[in-house]
Image: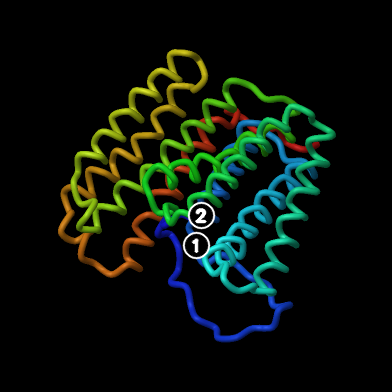
Amino acid sequence: MISYPLASVSRSSGTKSVYSPTFSPEHGVLLVLAGALLTGASLAQAWTWETTLACLAAFLGLQAEHPLTVQIKQRRSLKPRYLLWAGLYGSSAIAIALYLSYRHPYLIWVCAGAAIAMGVNVVAVLNRRQKTIDTEILMFMAICLSTLFAYGVTAGDLTVEAVGLWMLNSLFFASAVFTIKLRKAKTSSLTGSLVYHGVAVVLTTVLYFLGWLSLFTALTLSIALLKLIVVTVFREWYCSCRFEYIARFETYFALTYTALACLTVLPEYLPVAG
């Protein structure tokens, strides 16, 4: 799906039982998912049992993508293990999402967006375009829909502030697409990265003036700009060092952004249980 290098190196484990669960080797997207869910819940300023269900549905949906993608890539032969777990993960995620959408009908639009993104991803895998910039950006936006999902089930509504936070999360996490591709010869030009970050700044500024983001929340995008500056200054190191160091590098910036974004949407004083 997405080559976001917060991931650990995937390991070959040989032949496994059909009942052995599959897990996505792209561990980095789990960090993106966690960031999206935490910022959504922070904006809602609460955590309920439905928030936990929303997190579970999002996690299962993300896990369903991996075995489905593997089966599509190897479609000349059926892979029972991948079919089984794609079905189990996917059906569980859909069941939870439908239940929460029944309780909160406005969430159907969020679920529809996720379903469309999954369909686009399937088509992209069929056409071997899942690693293109446009597809990867779309997938980051789809994962960040979890912001709206977590907020919607927790707050009982969808607001322009939640939409603004979803867009900000999408802009930040998708920025990694451009910095990471600097490591590849075919996409080593800084032009695309500079254009993307420039557009991201403009869009974030517009969201702020529309009142969809607070000033401090909007300023968290500066973490992406800081990362771009560091990558540009230390480009030789960034493009030649071992992958595990890039994973840590990206992880630190993602965690910093998530923490700051959560803090900017939380109230000044948290309620104390009596």
Whether residue 27 is situated above or below residue 14 in the rendered picture: above
How far apart, in angstroms, are the residues tagged by discs 2 and 1?
6 Å
Residue 73 x, y percent position in the rendering: 52, 65
230, 118: nearer the viewer: 118
Residue in view at x 43 percent, y 57 percent: 128
Residue 164 x, y percent position in the rendering: 52, 26
Residue topped by disc 2: 29
Residue 203 x, y percent position in the rendering: 39, 24
Q: How crowded is mark 2: few (under 14 residues within 10 Å), some or many (20 or more)?
A: many
Whether residue 146 is situated above or below residue 108 in the rendered picture: below
Residue 53 relative to residue 15: left or right? right
Residue 254 x, y percent position in the rendering: 43, 49
State the mark number for residue 26: 1
* SS of the residue under disc 1: loop
185, 43: nearer the viewer: 185
State the mark number for residue 95: none
Residue in view at x 24 percent, y 36 percent: 194
Q: How crowded is mark 1: few (under 14 residues within 10 Å), some or many (20 or more)?
A: many
At label 2, which amino acid type do we have?
Answer: Val
